[in-house]
Image (spheres, helix red, strand yellow):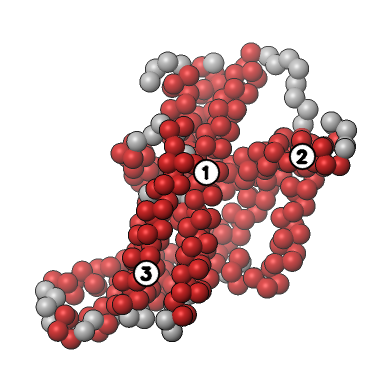
Amino acid sequence: MLASCVLMASALLLIMWQQLLPGLLCVCVGFLATRWLSPRLGVLLRTPETGAPRLAAALMVLAPLLVVALAVPRTRGLILDAPAQYRDLLAFMARTVLEFRDKLPGDIATQLPEGALEIQRAIATYLASKAGTLATTGRAWLVGLLFAFVGLVIGALAAARPSAQELKPLAAQLHLRVRRFGESFRQIVVAQFWIALFNTCLTAVFLLVLLPLWDSRLPYTTALLLLTFVAGLVPIVGNLICNGVLTLVGLSVSPLVALSCLGFLVLIHKAEYFINAKVIGHRTQMGVWELLSVMFVMEAIFGPAGLVAAPLFYAYTKKELQAMGWV
C-alpha cells in the first residue's frame, strides 16, 4: 500500500511538472466514456461481450478525428489560433480600462478620485503583460491538443482491455488507487462539466439573442463563450474570471451594457449554486474554504493548470485519507 501511494503521488507530481494535465484529464474522459458506451453498444447492436468494449474504444478514438476533419475548415481560427485571439482580447481589455473615465457620464467621472487613474494604469499594464505572454504560447497550445488526443486514446484502450482475474499485491493496490482517482474525477470534473455547459448556454442566449434585441453587441463573442466554458470548469474562481472579463468587455460598449452583463451573470451563478447542490451535493464533502485554500496553493506552485487540477487532486487525496480512517 505504501509503495502504491508513493507511486501515485509521484505520478501526479510528474504530470503537473511536465505539464501533462490535459493528457491526464483526457485519459479519464476516454476511460469513463468507453466504459459508459460499451454496455449500451452491446445491447443496441447485440455484439459479443468482448466485442462491445473494442467497438466503443474505436468510436472514442475516431470521434475526435471526425470532428476535427469536419469542424477545422470552418473553425480553424477558433481552435488553432486561440492564443492569438485571447491575446487580442486582453489587449482590448487593457485599452478599455484606460478609457474607463471616458465611458462614464461626465458628472460621475469627475467624482472619481485621482488615485483611480493609477489603479487603471496598473490593471492595464497587468493585462498587457498577460497578452504579451500569450504571444509565445501558440506551440504549447498545439502540443497540449496533441497530448489531449493521445490521452483520450490511452483511456479508451485501457477501458477496452479485459480485466485481469488475479492481481499481485502491488498491482492490486495501484488498481485501487486508480479506481478512487476515477471516482473523484467523475464526482468533480464530470459534474463541473455540466455546470460549465449550463453557464455557457445561458451566456450564449444573453450575448447572441438578448443583447442584439437591445441593439447592443459585444466584440469577441465567440472567444468569450469559449472562455466561459473553460473557466466554468474551475469552481468558484472561474465564475469570478467570467464575471470580470464579460463586464469589462461590456464596458467597452457602454456602462449600461456592463451593468446588464454583471446582473445577468449574477443570476446565472445563483442558479448554478442550486445545480451545484443537486449535481455535486454532499458527495464531495469539501468546504469552500478548503477548496479555495488548495486552489491558491496549487496556482502558486503550478500556475493556471494548478487551478484546474486542485479540486480533482484534493478530492482524491481526501478520499484516500477517509478510506484509511485518518479524516
Residue name at image x 27 percent, y 82 percent: 103
Which numbered disc flags the more N-terminal residue, 3 or 1?
A: 1
Q: Estimate the spatial distance between the alpha carbons at disc 2 and disc 1, rounded to whole Å.
A: 21 Å
Mark 1 surroundings: few (<14), some (14-19) or many (≥20) residues within 10 A = some
> Could you tell me which secondary element the residue under label 1 belongs to?
helix
Mark 2 surroundings: few (<14), some (14-19) or many (≥20) residues within 10 A = some
Quadrant of the image occupied by residue 276:
top left
Regarding residue 255, the answer to whether it shows in the image is yes
User: What residue sits right under mark 1 in the picture?
Assistant: 191
Q: Amino acid at mark 3?
A: Cys
Which numbered disc flags the more N-terminal residue, 2 or 3?
A: 2
Q: Estimate the spatial distance between the alpha carbons at disc 3 and disc 1, rounded to whole Å.
A: 25 Å
User: What residue sits right under mark 3 in the picture?
Assistant: 261
Q: Is residue 268 shown above or below 58?
A: below
Point out residue 33 in the picture as x, y percentages from the top left corner: 68, 42
Residue name at image x 24 percent, y 73 percent: 121
Q: Estimate the spatial distance between the alpha carbons at disc 2 and disc 3, rounded to whole Å.
A: 42 Å
Point out residue 91 in the picture as x, y percentages from the top left corner: 39, 74
In the image, which disc is placed on residue 243? none
Q: Amino acid at mark 1?
A: Ala
Mark 3 surroundings: few (<14), some (14-19) or many (≥20) residues within 10 A = many
Q: Is residue 72 left or right of residue 227?
A: right
In the image, which disc is placed on residue 40? 2
Tell me the quadrant of the picture where the N terminus can be found: top right
Regarding residue 230, the answer to whether it shows in the image is no
Which numbered disc flags the more N-terminal residue, 2 or 1?
A: 2
Point out residue 160 in the picture as x, y percentages from the top left corner: 77, 35
Q: Amino acid at mark 2?
A: Arg
Q: Is residue 162 left or right of residue 125?
A: right
Question: Foreground residue, 18 or 208?
Answer: 208
Residue name at image x 29 percent, y 74 percent: 97
> Could you tell me which secondary element the residue under label 3 belongs to?
helix
